[in-house]
Image (tube, helix red, strand yellow):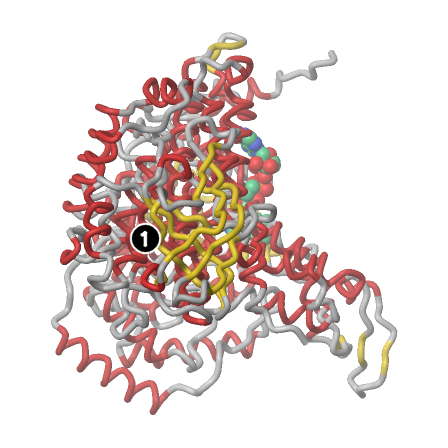
Amino acid sequence: MSVGLLASATPEQELLLDSSSRFIERTMPLPSVRELAAGSGGVDARYHEAAGSLGWFGMLVGEEHGGGTVSGNGLLDAAAVAAERGGVLQPGSFATANVVAHLLAAEGSRHGEVLARLVAGRARATWAVGDVAGLTPGAGEIVAGEDGGGGFRLDGDVRHVPDAADCDLLVVTAHGPRGLTQFLVAADTPGVQARRMASLDITRRPGAVRFHDVRVGADAVLGAPGDATAARFEWQVGIAAVLTAAESVGAMHRDLEAAVEHAGTRIAFGRPIGSFQAVKHLLADLSLSLEMAKAVVSAAAESLGSEPPGSEPPGFGARDGVDLAHAAKAFVAEHGVELAHGCFQVFGGVGYTWEHDHHLFMRRLAADAVAFGSAQWHRDRLGERIGVG
Amino acid sequence: MRDIAAEHDSDVGAEHDDGDNAAPERDDSAAPEREVRAPAQALDEYRARARAWIEANLERGQASGLRRGDTDPAAIAAGRALQRRLYEAGYTGITWPREYGGQGLGPEYERAFQQEARGYRLPDLGIAGGTTFGVCAMTMLAHASADFLRRHIPRILAGEELFVQFFSEPEAGSDLAGVRTRAVRSGDGWVLNGSKIWSSGAYYADWGMCLARTDWDVPKHRGLTWFAVPVTAPGVTVERIRQITGDAEFCQEFFDDVVLGDGDVIGQVNDGWTVAQTMLMFERGGGLSHGTRTTGASTGVAPDLVELARATGRLADPLTRDLIVRAHVDDVARRALLARLGERMRTDPAQALHLASYAKLVSGVHDPIRADIAMRIGGADAVNWETVGADGACADGAHGDAVSGDAVNRDERPGDSPGPKVAVGFLNSRFMSIAGGTNEMQRNSIGERVLGLPREPSFDRGKPFREVLRDARGWSSARE
Ligand SMILES: Cc1cc2nc3c(=O)[nH]c(=O)nc-3n(C[C@H](O)[C@H](O)[C@H](O)COP(=O)(O)OP(=O)(O)OC[C@H]3O[C@@H](n4cnc5c(N)ncnc54)[C@H](O)[C@@H]3O)c2cc1C
């Protein structure tokens, strides 16, 4: 059963979600996620390629690049898939892969070959964004200087980069001589050094990347530096926030589902604990939060992913969409963790065990809560829309 | 998650909640789904006609500004007159069946009319208008006899009959199926005795939709019948009750040998619980507009709170701004939830009653939070304010007025202070967590009917209601 991010899916969306869930169930069910967590490696290449063939990395990309959407709104489709992924705590960074694909598609055919590999799942990409705009305090930043020969040199160290050590391609958001500048950098460029970070969320593989005198040509620049990139950055964060929140929603759904199941079968005082109102009402409240989370995330995806005619740059949704994305991430970041707490309480002692899956969900929800902007950061962005005086 | 509604037997425990199993049969006119699309041209023509009529007949301006609570008879009379003009022009009951005075058109026509009428003054019939059109008539359309509907619905549409809810009693609120008002068969009619309470707007309404017990020797859900009771019938006494806001909007009614006819019965005798389920769905917001995806954030960030913060000089304070944005985030999620629920109810009508509990609970939980945010932003200004006399000079703010918010309509007006509005908002903020089924009832419904959690033990299931009352008297304290 789908986690049901969408209130109603089109038959094509259903097909996409169904094939995605079956793929997950076949190749990376929770026991496999645990195995992966116990080891030190990342997810294997076959998983990634198979995911690519399902269309996971091409939903924000036009058909000319091998992508396409089933509903006409790629972000909505992607969010629905993200929710299914989140429900089974899938590894790898779906959000950054899609952000990068979207960004490269906006470059027309310039990066066509790289993009095709990315969409096919034969290359993996992540986004080194650091603390740009205060997104992740303490994450560090990259500075880009002109190298005198028309190219740039990048220096700095950024942390909290999803799958940093397992990617072939990096999009780097850097402070350049003409303002915010984004670069496409191959992970094997001399001077680029990725390392893993330990994580509360053992189902993911975050890392850090050090740039030491990394030389890139002018052709590595994505879009126009300065204001245009700053504007684009907002959309990127919006997309990453929506997809991350959608994954959280999937995790919330499954954690709650397990708690409900537990409440229906665990007996105390001669009755199932779910018949006690203290338990039942807690679960009802959590389910209200979950419904709201699904509603606000899908509304954000729908709005941010819809393309009003003549939108500039093409492929970027309505202004409303960015605001809704902030609201969605702010809502889910807090209610996701709260839901995990509530479920934990319902599980009782068994929820404290390594063996029970609950802690995996709880870890994931806490980590997602701060990925691509904490609730506070997203509220601050919305707060900037309030005039003072 | 699981849908186990069908597994429940037919007389469940807890109340102002669903109690019973299958969704009641409904007439399509009341059902959420309706997919017939009007040909674009017909709709355009309709819209143009409506616009012309609106421009020629309605005044510009928002709703009449009737305040909850202290409804002025002249304002209500004006509301009724305006309602009649709309009725005569064919702009009420746009989606309701033609044979009962409606227009029998699709929801897109209703929407078109509402869009064209934006910015114009539509009839305001106060809270009784809300109960009439939002709950009572919708429920009647689903269950009442054709004869009943022919008598009442056209008059409702014409503003002649306002219906209020005679549901709750001094001894039965959440446990709606536990009502004790009795209707006894007498000749070819009925005699009603008992009392109803908290009936919003009853003092200016024409009819009450009344739930009464007609059989005491069967389990509580099975001995109930609905009646339409004229508020002015001999034997009906209405008393207004002063509320925490100082308003006196809700009432208590006493029925002393009120004579009713068979024609006043709504639905089948002793099958009142089926009707009640439809009623509860509308009460919970099950009639909310369906499939409208207006979730945009374009209305701005909680404009009312921004205005409040500006008025109290706190807008630059980062903590205040964060509170405002928190409220905004919840506002956005709530709007999105309602759109989602509309869509889910459309695709899963059998679950509509239970899904509607989310619409009710979200208000019950979040209204108080939002009111609390307003109180925090308002600070002392939301607690104390200066009043201005009719002559514009400073007046001594009497306590009664200071907490009643009635100051707005009385001789003493608050100065420029935002205080009264915030304070009244605070006092009213638990309306949705209690009225029309408490948060706990919604949580039971969601827990049991949506999540499929096990029922709690019940002490009245399957027992004749007479015995239920007798046995309940035997409960003792845990300390005894
Ligand atoms: C402003 C306002 C307007 C109203 N308007 C109308 C109206 O127009 N017509 C009308 O008929 N009624 C009206 N009501 C009445 C309203 O529907 C009832 O107040 C409501 O259903 C609760 O019933 P009660 O007040 O008897 O509280 P009770 O049922 O006595 O409940 C008291 C507390 O006990 C809890 N409780 C009760 N049973 C359970 C249970 N099984 N499990 C857990 N907790 C339980 C309740 O949740 C609540 O917290 C109005 C009420 C208000 C406040």
Residue B169 visible from this viewpoint: no
Quadrant location of the N terminus of chain A?
Answer: top left
User: Residue shown at 21%/29% (left/top)?
Assistant: A46
Q: Is residue A134 left or right of residue B400?
A: left
Q: Observer-nearest residue: B402 or A110?
A: A110
Tell me where residue A270 appears, x and y as whole percent: 50, 8
Q: How many marks?
A: 1
Q: Observer-nearest residue: A151 or B9?
A: A151
Amino acid identity at mark 1: Met
Tell me where residue B376 appears, x and y as whole percent: 72, 57
Ligand 1: give its quadrant.
top right
B436 above or below B153? above
Residue A389 visible from this viewpoint: yes
A327 above or below A250? below
B119 above or below A91? below
User: Residue shown at 18%/53% (left/top)?
Assistant: A68
User: Residue shown at 29%/68% (left/top)?
Assistant: B93
Q: Observer-nearest residue: A384 or A225?
A: A225
Q: Residues within 10 Å of mark 1 (few under 14, many from 20)?
A: many
Quadrant location of the C terminus of chain A?
Answer: bottom right
Tell me where residue A186 appears, x and y as whole percent: 34, 47
User: Residue shown at 50%/29% (left/top)?
Assistant: A362
Q: Which residue is mark 1?
A: B140
User: To which chain does the residue with label 1 belong?
Assistant: B
